[in-house]
Image: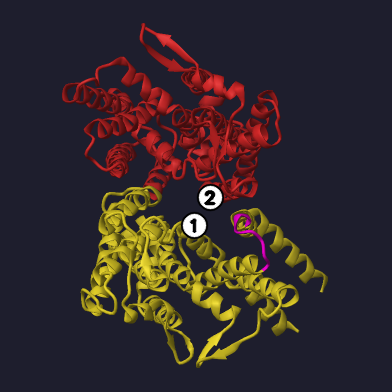
Chain colours: A yellow, B red
Amino acid sequence: MTTRASWWERLRHSSLFWPLVALALVMLFNLLFTPNFFRLEIKDGHLFGSLVDVLNRGAPLMLMAIGLTAVIATAGVDLSVGAVAAICAAMATRLVGNVTDVTATPLPLVIMIALGLAILCGIWNGLLVSRANIQPMVATLVLMVAGRGIAQLITDGQIITVYYPPFFYFGAGYLLGLPFTLFIVAAVFLFARLMTRRTAIGLFVESVGTNASSSFYSGINEKNIKLLAYVFCSFCAGIAGIIISSNVKSADANNVGLFMELDAILAVVIGGTLMSGGRFSLAGSVLGALLIQSVTTTIYAFGVPPEVVLVVKSLVVLFVVLLYSEPVKIALDKLAQRKGVRA
Amino acid sequence: MMRKLQIDSKYLPLLVTIVLFLGLYAFGVVQYRGFSSPQVFFNLLIDNAFLLITSIGMTFVILSGGIDLSVGAVIAFTTVLSAYMLEELGLSPIIVIPTVLLFGVTLGAVMGSIIHFFKVQPFIVTLAGMFFARGMCFVISTDAITISDPFYRALALYRIPILGKTFISINVVIVLVVLLAALYLAHLTRFGRTVYAIGGNQHSALLMGLPVARTKILVYTLNGFCSALAGVVFSIYMLSGYGLYTNGLELDAIASVVIGGTMLTGGVGYVIGTVFGVLIQGLIQTIIMFQGTLNSWWTKIVVGLLTLLFIGLQSAFASSRRTRMAARKAQPAAKVTPGAAKLASDVSQQG
């Protein structure tokens, strides 16, 4: 009895509890109301179905959420992820060029240059936040606004369409029957997980997020930790940008990653990482991104006009945020305690 | 001597802003023919009337230490709702204008209440408000609706002549009324003092017995009203309603407030500075227009860099204040130490 209770307590207090519950609710809703949501088919050796679709389409969001988790854990925020994705998409497609079956630049070089650009964006954000001491929200706002201008500059204001099949592999390819994007997400997730849980970096990030000045006095180079977080975030956003452009076989500087910064922040918050920094959960953020993607897919599958999606999302944001708010948490804890006493 | 230095640094950002505005204006006059015409200046007011109104509302929010990201979406929603009610439902402007203003006020009050009572970061709540208002635009209409209502048309076309050939629009008059009301509110009422106090330190304000809850909610309500009013002004200016209008306007509004010398951490700043912040953005746009060869997104880049510059200036001020506080801490007056240390750590955390 006690072990069961403590197991329940542990789960309830785990950061993954609420996102799991929400995801389960969405899945239950789909089980009951959306026909064929759980049907999986194998066509040409590839797995198809709504679930795979959610995973595949959610890949860019999951990547951004992983990157943003690091930044939010340092008590910052990065609003420029969408714009960085657009810059990377623009650069990658520009380098591939629009000649059929031929690439203007070797593919590894394309990826390296595009991601290098993303890292530069991250360094810019990181320096503004850590060295110039500018509020993160505002510092990254600058790149959010100017970034799309830079992307326009790279594409000359055109929508660049590419016709080089190997480039499509990143966004639309399959490996072992599963979308290749999933392997990218898994690799980035594992990398982030190893870096934060198997080295001291994760602790440093949490410490900086909890109290930057006391971290500084205990010998942590808080400035470089922050810088690192922003660079990692932009790096993830850059990969997301390449996936998006490869998936739609083009790059439109105005639309790649538009409004995704908001979804990404939401994913991180749903995942249980507090906006005020400190403890973070990478798995929670990935779950949060999956939740957002499945809600979006469900809404579309249900035949709701896309216009309503924004309204529904806003209400979901509000609901989740209220769930995490302090007064509600205290009330819930009280409720749980009262139950415990009665038992 | 210390005291004098403090007062100087208080007015310095505002002074920098005004000097920058005059400098830019002088640059325009020297560089381009026809720039000196008073109409160029009046056009600044006419074209930026909606931005002025919403930025004035935003000033109060930022002064109180908060932020509101929903203003652009609320303006867009107001234009769509106005156009829909006027054209599709055939309602009279006498009903339409109060209704849309009421919507803005309600949304602001709801967001303010959530921010205060649930202790949620303003940034997230207003982000949700932004999604909500944008979404509602498209629920009402996915296309642009042209306003053909005679009253709106008359307002849009009416010109108030000033000094002979030059003129201003009705919208500018609305802006001036809003500005005067805002100046009165900020500097001559208890509400204004409380807003400054909350922005300076919410805990202290609460301990001083100031009505923190009421004031915080009122600030967001006021901003909701301002955005809705800006939406009315914008629908008069554009004579149409569309859900994609004023995309990213919240950034322009925040930039105006910051360029106007208001601290993003709250508690320091002036409404009049915001007006100059908007005018500087307008001037940059006008200069780029007069230049003729530059791409219009250069405006965004220049405004972005200017915002950065001003925030850099602010953090420099903040750190100089921190050192001053540390100096005071070293003095034997031990009583102030905990508060000062708390404030300093607040500043360092937020800044």
Q: Between marks 1 and 2, how big is the CA–CA gap?
A: 8 Å
Q: Mark 2 lies on which chain?
A: B
* Residue, disc 1: A262
Kindly identify the residue that appears in the image at 50 percent across and 92 percent down. Answer: A44
Which x, y percent locates residue A336?
A: 73, 67
* Residue A219, above or below B173: below
Q: Which residue lies furthest to the right in this view?
A: A342
Q: Quadrant of residue B254?
A: top left
Q: Give the crowd class for mark 2: few <14, some 14-19, many >=20 residues within 10 Å.
A: many
Q: Give the range drawn in magenta.
A: A302-308
Regarding residue B104, the answer to whether it shows in the image is no
Give the left or right position of residue A58, taking residue B283 as reference. right
* Residue, disc 2: B127
Residue nearest the viewer, comparing A187 with B4: A187
Amino acid under disc 2? Leu
Helix, strand or loop at disc 2? helix
Q: Which residue lies furthest to the top in this view?
A: B164
Helix, strand or loop at disc 1? helix
Do the numbered discs 1 and 2 sit on residues whose CB atoms are within 8 Å? yes
Regarding residue B43, the answer to whether it shows in the image is yes
Number of the label disc, if any, that sits on residue A167? none
Q: Residue furthest left?
A: B30
Give the left or right position of residue B119, taking residue B289 as reference. right
Residue nearest the viewer, comparing A3 with B283: B283
